[in-house]
Amino acid sequence: MTPLYWRRRATNVVVMTLALGATALGLVWLVLVLWTLVANGVAAITPSLFLESTPPPGSSGGLANAIYGSIVMTAVATLIGAPVGILAGTYLAEYGAGTRIAPTIRFVNDILLSAPSIIIGLFVYEVMVLKMGHFSGWAGATALAIIVVPVVVRTTEDMLNLVPTALREAAAALGAPKWRVIVFIAYRAAMQGMLTGVMLAFARIAGETAPLLFTALNNQFFSTDMNAPMANLPVVIFQFAMSPYVDWQSLAWGGALLITVTILVLNIAARLFAAWGSFGR
Amino acid sequence: MTDTVYSLDLSGTRRRTLGDRLFKATAAGFAFLVLAILAAVILALVDGALPALREFGIGFLATEEWDPVLDEFGALAPIYGTLVTSAIAMLVGIPVAFGIAVFITELCPAWLKRPIGVLIELLAAIPSIIYGIWGLFVLAPFLQRHVQPFLIDTLGTVPGVGALFRGPPLGIGIFTAGIILAIMVLPFIASITRDVFETVPPILKESAYGLGATTWEVVRSVVVPYTRAGIVGGVMLGLGRALGETMAVTFVVGNAHRIDTSLFAPGTTISAALANEFTEAVGDLYFSSLIALGLILFLITFTVLSLAKLMLLRLQQKAGT
């Protein structure tokens, strides 16, 4: 064997070991982060976390108002953003072929998808908070909805494009008008994928902090009024973790563990749901 | 045959076209809403930034001064921080992401591909605030105690480049922010690079293997040239993410409006400055300067993302999808 052969082989072994090392490194972060979360946050997971509101430093309390606020704003944002996204994605998939406007909308959608979320928060501050004169849960939900829409548009369009044209043609041949073909045939065929997209969008906004920083702000007390500043988990974690008080920091870790577990469970559930029924086909 | 004429029942047709028209109009309306949102964002940012831009002019981009008391603002320190932390993130993240993609596509046994892919995507799903508190409480002390003193003693003594590694080991600073960004950005780049690697026609790789090439040679000479545009596109998408990342950076960057030659010094980025100061800004000029910062960030990410899209589009056309 020539020296060249051994040199090539050695290079290959070195590079492949580096690749293996890189993968191990990438996965090690995940394990480290999760481990830290569990180690620091598990102590705070008590019933009072869910029953009591955020306390002043030095007193005991929980995160009930923040959890409630987060759930409400995320749900409202998804309820607003998902239909907008689904219909926009339907336009791109069903009516957009061949038009010049569709690629433009797709391009703009991808820009919005990756735009920094703090800019979205800034925008909603300008148009809603300033006009209304105060922070509100509605502004927070709107900012989150603007983040939901591009995600849902993307997944809806991709899923609808996977539906075979033959299905649509068969329905049209039977006399169905176009909107019935879309709603009763195409949607039904793509439903699993579309719902997965909505679930993933929900999981994404569940952890978003920046858009809520200057829209919903925060609230020390339990409030159901969406027309006023509303407590939410990410901003509370931000405030408590940066503070010098140990009990606040402990609550922050508990909240962080809660958010991470929720998001990971949602992601895994979305994946399982997307694959449901397709094994063995 | 009788001479009955089958009359077409047209009474349902009008209803049907109405339903079609309504549905199409609604769908189109929401699709145009997407365009309207982007336009509105740009307009709102420009409108809010105008007072500051009128006051400071183009010098706004070149001044390091950030004095809320005297109403003197300059964007240089945040812009510098944003660019440098993103550069560190790319330098550290791209090789690791590339290694992961190579591993998944070339080395990994088939049964392991899916689980590792899922784990990488879970890494991407973790919200940035989690990385932020992890960075503040775990990574920063670790870097402060073990990595930074070592680097200061070794690389810091080298003339020239050493200036980057001098100063007290604070733990928080531009360097730590860059590392956290690298961890956040690498799952994105890894997934896109892996997807792009998988578009290479197997026959090309098999021909190379058949000629006796090693795995690395196949990657270097067949896969990468074929997918070059896609890799660049993926990298730029990751860059776009790094530029705009807020919460993780805010926790560890140190939040000081200054530029220092040392990477270990505290600094600030545009998004961190916004997150920290926006709710406390008093005075129209302060407020408008912050929005001007937001406009600058938006323009930077818009440019990077547009270039990324163009690159990925070129690869799609080449692959025939």
Image (cartoon, rainbow, N blue to C red):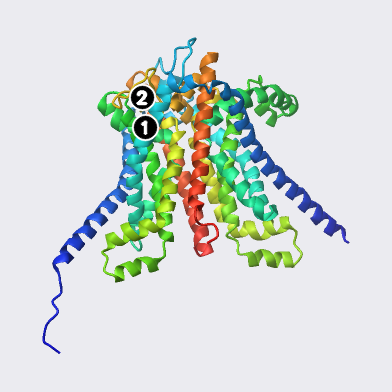
Other-residue count near label 1 (Cα within 10 Å), few / some / many at <14 / 14–19 / ≥20: many
The spot of residue B27 in percent (x, y) is 29, 53
Circle nearer the N terminus (2, 1): 1
Left or right position of A63 against B266: left
Q: For the image shown, how many numbered marks are present on the structure?
A: 2
Other-residue count near label 2 (Cα within 10 Å), few / some / many at <14 / 14–19 / ≥20: many
Image quarter (top left, top right, bottom left or bottom right) of the N terminus of chain A: bottom right
The residue under the point 63% across, 56% down is B224
Q: Which mark is residue A230?
A: 2
The residue under the point 82% across, 54% down is A7
Question: Which element type, helix, strand or loop, lies under badge 1?
Answer: helix
Q: Badge 1 sits on which subunit?
A: A
Question: Which element type, helix, strand or loop, lies under badge 2?
Answer: loop
In the foreground, B49 or B113: B113
Q: Amino acid at mark 1?
A: Met
Q: Which residue lies under the disc numbered 1?
A: A73
Residues at marks 2 and 1, common chain? yes
In the foreground, A57 or A170: A170
In the foreground, B306 or A122: A122
Q: Badge 2 sits on which subunit?
A: A
